[in-house]
Amino acid sequence: MMAWSTLTRLRHEHQQQKLDRERLALLVRAAKYRYQEAQEVVQGWNGYRKFTVAQKSLECEDVYSFYLVPHDRKSLPPFKPGQYLTFNLEVPGRDKPVVRCYSLSDSPTRSDCYRVTIKREPAPADKPGVPPGVASGFFADHVKEGDLLNVKAPTGHFYLDLSKNTPICLLAGGVGLTPMLSMAKAVAESGSRREVWLFFGCRSSAEHMLREDLDALRRHDNIRVFVCYSRPGKASVRGEDYDHEGRVTVELLKEKLPSNNYEFFMCGNGAFMKTLNDGLEAWGVPEKDIHYEAFGPATVKKKTTPAVAATTTGPACKVVFAKSGKEVEWSPTQANLLDFALEQGLRIESGCRAGSCGVCSVAIKSGSVDYVKTPDAAPEGGSCLTCICRPKGDLVLDA
């Protein structure tokens, strides 16, 4: 009797897996069709396109969601969960537009609008001379419903491949929840049985953003959500408002996950990602299974790529800034050409500082460069993205 019961169960599981694969294959084909159709409709969306702010919602303290619809009323191309939008902002008091990238925070299946969720960034506590976030403050204080914004099409190499069925673990710190939420919602709405664990860390209920979205994910039995408060406060109830007191750590992952055989995706501040990345590698997670998203110099994972390793052990070289008439010795310990130029008192325009927006592109007059990561915004031929590249040898830049 037991053998027959086991056989029946296995047959049922096999049939369910087959149905799941067929359903996923249909969804993938449908998504490809929608993408091709949308591409035909919005041909020429190169550069910036105007979007109307249809709705602005306060999610929690200093965090707003912006729902964007095309001003031309044409269709929206779908995006991959985890990708971002690039904004060109006319900020009062600034001589030039401010370019920033923000992750899409909703499911790719939503076709009526794009949503980004943005936190007002304060001045760094350890750097009193550094001003608060220019773009995030502009969104919080100045952008209102009905405004028009200049937006580039969704892009980015950090995304979840929905054609795969490998289990995933999503690690989010603060507003780093946005791309993680998009990934989790994409799995939930696809009907896939893919195993998903989402760990979200914030200080308290005051910073607990996008609650309704997180609560909706809990209704899917293949998706586990853990909300971690580092400073819960007396008014917060464990088991109702949050699940764990403390930060998102590898020790917590070891306690909750059945193994380390997951693809890990993370987004948060620099300290959050570095601590988790180091801990995951020490736990034996292969580097290929650790993915991250970062905008800005403080959050880019400081990992030496093979190309950079070769440069850091090689001889110093000369970098010539042709327009400025400066010739400077390059040290292999430098992080990238943009920071190097700024240290020399030279001004190169920049935006995201993570190879995403293309603002820091500079023409190369002679020489070549290595990239420390794959650029999201491909530079024009004969140019380089100075925020994520280093010289391979003597280099002359048109700057």
Image: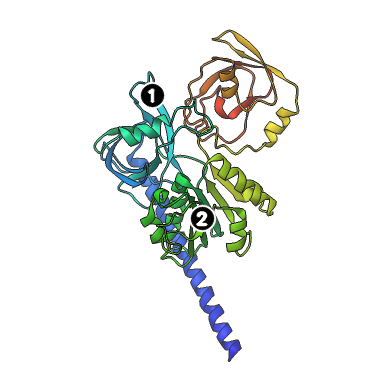
The residue nearer to you, when weighing 29 against 72, is 72
Q: Which part of the image, by quadrant, shows the C terminus?
A: top right
Q: Residue at x 55, y 27 (%)?
A: 387
Q: Residue at x 25, y 39 (%)?
A: 145
- Report, in whole angstroms, how far the alpha carbon at label 2 lies from the one at label 1: 36 Å
Q: Which of the numbered marks, if any, corresponds to residue 97?
A: 1
The residue nearer to you, when weighing 284 against 238, is 238
Q: Is residue 142 visible?
A: yes
Element assignment for label 2 = strand
Left or right, 100 with reference to 70: right
- Residue 130 position in % (x across, y down): 48, 27
Q: Which of the numbered marks, if any, corresponds to residue 199?
A: 2
Element assignment for label 1 = loop
Disc nearer the start of the sequence (2/1): 1
Left or right, 132 with reference to 363: left
**Residue that lies at the very extreme toward the left in this rendered image:** 146
Amino acid carrying mark 1 in the image: Pro
Q: Is residue 189 visible?
A: no
